[in-house]
């Protein structure tokens, strides 16, 4: 899928999609993704296997991640270059949201 279509489809990302891709700074199994997300969100976000595997399947179909089997024939997920482009776009968007939130939070006290 071309990058413009991917950007339209994925940005802004759901929190689930964002944290799944954020976990793929290295190839991981599904369970490894679940544990990593739980760890980096200090337990705030616990992804269920139904949620994660549905999202991973969609991402694979769209070319955002690739899937392969490791030595133990476990499924391993890896982000593609297109997935990295998506993350760069989403991180830039989140930085803008963060800047605007900080600049204006005093208005809501």
Image (tube, rainbow, N blue to C red):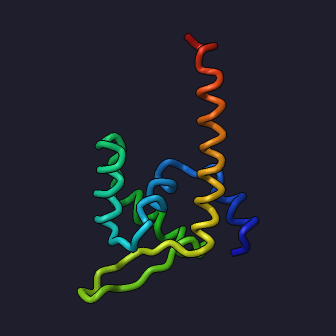
Quadrant in which residue 29 is drawn: bottom left
Left or right of 74? Residue 108 is right
Image coordinates for residue 16, horizontal then vertical, percent: 46, 52
Q: Residue at x 29, y 50 (%)?
A: 39
Left or right of 45? Residue 98 is right
Image coordinates for residue 25, horizontal then vertical, percent: 44, 66
Q: Residue at x 41, y 84 (%)?
A: 68
Left or right of 15? Residue 103 is right
Q: Where is the N terminus found, in terms of image quarters?
A: bottom right
Residue 106, above or below 95: above
Badge count: 0
- Residue lying furthest right: 4
Image coordinates for residue 77, horizontal then vertical, percent: 42, 74
Residue 65, above or below 73: above
Image coordinates for residue 51, horizontal then vertical, percent: 41, 57
- Residue lying furthest top: 109
Q: Residue at x 43, y 66 (%)?
A: 24
Quadrant in which residue 6 is drawn: bottom right
Q: Where is the C terminus found, in terms of image quarters?
A: top right
- Residue lying furthest left: 72
Quadrant in which residue 3 is drawn: bottom right
Q: Residue at x 73, y 66 (%)?
A: 5
């Amino acid at each position: 899928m071309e990058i413009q279509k991917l950007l339209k489809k994925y940005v802004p990302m759901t929190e689930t999609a964002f944290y799944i891709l954020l976990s793929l700074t290295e190839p991981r199994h599904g369970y490894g993704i679940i544990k990593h997300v739980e760890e980096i969100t200090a337990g705030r976000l616990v992804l269920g296997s139904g949620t994660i595997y549905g999202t991973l399947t969609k991402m694979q179909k769209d070319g955002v991640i690739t899937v392969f089997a490791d030595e133990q024939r476990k499924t391993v997920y890896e982000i593609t270059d297109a997935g990295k482009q998506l993350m760069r776009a989403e991180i830039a968007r989140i930085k803008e949201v963060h800047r605007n939130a900080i600049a204006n939070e005093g208005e809501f006290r």
